[in-house]
Amino acid sequence: MESIKEIYRIGHGPSSSHTMGPKKAAEKFLKNNPNAQNFKVHLYGSLAATGKGHLTDFAIEQTIVNHPLEIFWEPKIFLPKHPNAMKFEAYGDDNKILDEWTCYSVGGGALIDDYTESETLELYPHHSMDEILNWCKANDKEFWEYVIEFENDDIWEYLEEVWHVMNESITRGLKTDGILPGGLKLLRKAQSFNTRGQNFATPFKRRSQLFSYALAVSEENASGGLIVAAPTCGASGVLPAVLRYFKKIHKSDKKTILRALATAGLIGNIVKTNASISGAEVGCQGEVGTACAMASAAATQMMGGTISQIEYSAEMGLEHHLGLTCDPVAGLVQIPCIERNAFAAERAVAHNNYALLTDGRHRISFDEVVETMYNTGIDLQSKYRETSEGGLAHFDALPKC
């Protein structure tokens, strides 16, 4: 497995696969063709189907500046390697093609092409939860200690930056009201949830705080704000909400939070390695489901759970989202994405409570749920995998004049 840094990508929303990935691809292609006079970009499959709502064209146009640029949308053409495909072409003075490159945005801002399966080198010798559990038990280590064993020396510094950006995105989101960009005219709710929640008794007040934290990040993401993909932009509100909630309610210190981030990153890494975190490939179960598994594991660790209880908590986080479709209305990362982040954060806290009431033993392992999630996602019809052609996206939710 590669570094958990690849699970935590810092950037601007609204989509890691549709915004971060294409922007990075455009930067790379532009750098490799400094003498090109003009460019053409072909967007395929899910990337083309919801690209306008996800600001894919804007991300590319803001990168390839000072050059003529044409973007072609091909939502009905799916290349075999991945639903989020794009082809870049560079042309010279005589309009003769100089270079072309086909690549795929596979989720979380990561890119692959027809020759490479990963952007970074592998750091971890193990690839499954069972292997990691066996290593931890044999060496009497926690999950976060396993991460530190194989990561580079700067991992704590990186996780500290991740937590800072997460925390700041919550703070900004709680201070901002108004309407989110895009044709849905959706009102921001984080600020009002946080304010109204103060007037209720403790249980409802705490739940309101948790909801507001998740909404704050998701609304910042929908507005193109600076967030951390964890593991994707569309699911970026779940883990920060749970971490901020534990900081507020349980007074968790920074060291505890950073260790929880290490463990959560490991959980996301296992899913990414053995299945997918791309909504275009496996539906929202790969995005919000993985985020919930990460947050569930983090919460259980922060409450002193054993590695078996943490694994169980993560297993529930993913299992309880099996079959969740990716059906963004109008191609925007707003409906149902934002609410799903809030409820996944609440589920993560519940999974923590449930796991801590057990000894960690259960019938279906995390690895088995990961495999099931991937197979379920592949079986989903394409209209339920980030094409905005089915599910909730089928309805016309645009406001009537």
Image (cartoon, helix red, strand yellow):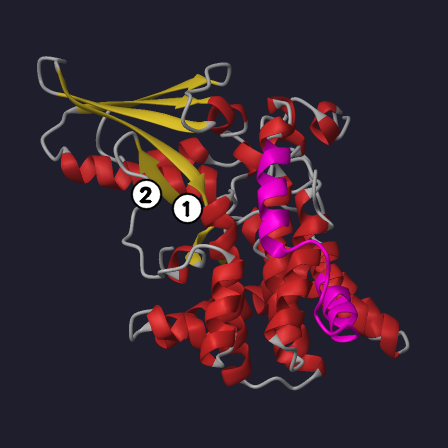
Disc 2: which residue: 24
Q: Is residue 359 magenta?
A: yes
Question: Residue 183: image x %, image y %?
Answer: 64, 33
* 234 and 300: which is toward the camera: 300
Tell me if label 2 and label 1 are in contact, CB under 8 Å. yes
Which badge, 2 or 1, comes first in the chain's sequence?
2
Residue drawn at x 27%, y 35% as measured from the top left: 64
Q: Is residue 39 above or below residue 283?
A: above
Q: Quadrant of the N terminus?
A: bottom left
Disc 1: which residue: 109
Relative side of 401 to 128, left or right: right
Relative side of 369 to 93, left or right: right
Residue drawn at x 66%, y 73% as measured from the top left: 300
* 35 and 312: which is toward the camera: 312
Residue drawn at x 72%, y 63% as measured from the top left: 212
Q: Would you call the spot at circle 2 few (<14 residues within 10 Å), some (14-19), or many (20 or more)?
A: some
Task: Check disc 1 and give the amino acid type.
Answer: Gly
Mark 2 or 1: in front is: 1
Q: Which residues are magenta?
A: 348-377
Residue drawn at x 77%, y 66% as measured from the top left: 350
Question: Residue 329: image x %, image y %?
Answer: 67, 32
Task: Check disc 2 and give the amino acid type.
Answer: Lys
Kind of element beneath mark 2: helix
